[in-house]
Image (cartoon, rainbow, N blue to C red):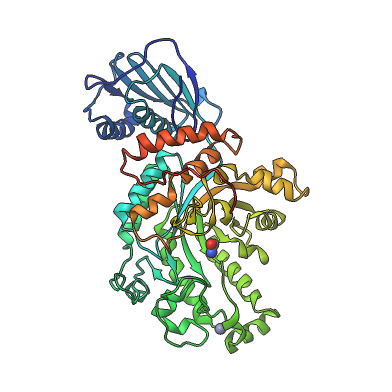
Amino acid sequence: MKVNVIPKVIAFPQKGSPCTISDDWVIGAPAKLKKYAYYLQVEIKNILGLDLKLNNSRKEKTIKLKTNKRKFVLAHASNVSCQGQHIEILGRDEQGLFYGIQTLKQIFLTSNNVIPACNTFSLPGVKWRGMHLDVSRHFFPISYVKKVIDLMALFKLNRFHWHLTDDQGWRIESKKFPLLHEIGSRRDEEGYREAQYYTQEEIKELVAYAEERFIEVVPEIDMPGHTQSVLAAYPHLSCTGKPTEVWLDWGVSDEVLCLGKETTYEFVEELLDEIIPLFKSKYFHIGGDECPDTAWEKCEHCQKKLRELGLDKSRALQHQFTNFLGKILEKHDKILIGWDEITEGVLPENSAVMAWRGDAVKAAVNAMKQDKQVIFTPNNCYYLDWRQTDEEGEHGAFGVTGLKRVYQCNPYRLIGKSTNRFYKAQIVKSILGVQANLWTERIHNEKELEYMLFPRLLAIAEQAMWDFELNDFEEFENRVKIVCEKVLKHYDVNYCETIYTGIKQ
Ligand code: ACM
Ligand code: ZN
């Protein structure tokens, strides 16, 4: 008996016959779990084309939904058992129940509705099982972002990092600074001249949609670099104050916020005061990556501010700015997240680090030395804009990170190998989790986006759920093929069919 689900579930065979549901089955749930029964009803209609009624008193031919804290030790754990005329989904809590439903959806699809008598368990996984999406370089409408959220939920991911702003486009409405979305969201390029941004209503709608699927939306407003779209709208915020345009190139722009002028700090605080309350996550990402200091070196305001602060290097301006942002976030009771460049200065008290450069180990260790938590997202493993096979013409950029390389990435082992400064338990405690990052410079449409995500996102979901304790790539590869063929195809998701098992870059 094999149950083909990703992330892998623990599965035991049970006595009894397989079950096949038909339209005389019902869904049974107590009143407090009714909304999950309705959700499952819609999903079953979509998967099997069956209209199941709700009935909480039937015993036979029933899919029973339950929660019970006492049955499990670990939060969000779930148990799905199938046998003859009974299916039961038991969650430790509502999130566990929701995950049990995801398990069952995949079982329906991969077994063609002939479900072996089985008893399956799913684990809680690391706390942060994330996926990032850059909507600045190429924009994707809310209706499509919802599809991405549904796919994340199907594979039990729980953090959506929404990269909303960058040099090439500002994608969130601001009522206080409307030129941000009116000017900053279009660029002088065929097909990109119309404004493309999310209204505040759409943002709230997506946050609520994700919350129902146990996914926190963590927005990123990237500062002080990657801000050319801001400066196109409000040029007085740059060092020179000269007009500029939303950027038409990829890479790192020298157009950054001036950190010498008081007006920049006032602008940023007012803007964040407006944007932060649109989101519910405890975390807020302020970017902080790839910010050249060339403009600051030449700017009289920046140099004056440096002298006033008693600092010598221009780079120190960024570190005091990160701490200024930390104070704003603290006012809103949020934890600051920044890309790993922020570890080069003293980190704000309430902050976490997203380690991304190279194998991400150096930055992770730097953050741990400051007693901060780390989200592990090495660009040489978890950046899904990299090519996934070494075939001629393969879509993507940079090196090759095939499915096997992604599957083998293990932050505990990598950090443990590089330093003996920390015990394994300290490393495990410091790694909040992992994340797939999808930058969209070379992703023009939904089909390309899905091709880059799958199947590699499945490897990250698998390892995140199993705390990197897995080591059987061949078994995983077989399951991936089945899940791609039966699950992703059903949901009309594009994926890369070649599974590259080399680990070269
Ligand atoms: C990054 O890839 N610039 C965080
Ligand atoms: Zn300046």
Taking depth in this image into account, of 461 and 89 the one nearest to the observer is 461
Residue 440 drawn at (x, y percent)? 42, 61
Q: Quadrant of the N terminus?
A: top left
Q: Give the tally of numbered discs.
A: 0
Answer with the quarter of the image where residue 474 lies: top right
Q: Which residue is drawn at 61% across and 60% down?
A: 357
Answer with the quarter of the image where residue 31 lies: top left
Q: Is residue 371 left or right of residue 57?
A: right
Say above or below: 414 vs 302: above
Ligand 1 quadrant in view? bottom right
Residue 212 drawn at (x, y percent)? 37, 43
Q: In this view, does 147 lie to the left or right of 79?
A: left
Taking depth in this image into account, of 412 and 310 the one nearest to the observer is 412
Q: Which residue is drawn at 36% across and 61% down?
A: 444
Q: Quadrant of the C terminus?
A: bottom right
Residue 346 shows up from this direction: no
Q: Which residue, as the protein is rendered here, is positioned at the far front?
A: 392
Residue 362 shows up from this direction: yes
Residue 107 drawn at (x, y percent)? 38, 28
Q: Which residue is drawn at 33% across and 73% down?
A: 186
Residue 201 drawn at (x, y percent)? 30, 59
Q: Which residue is drawn at 44% across and 74% down?
A: 249
Q: Is residue 165 left or right of residue 356?
A: left
Say above or below: 437 vs 29: below
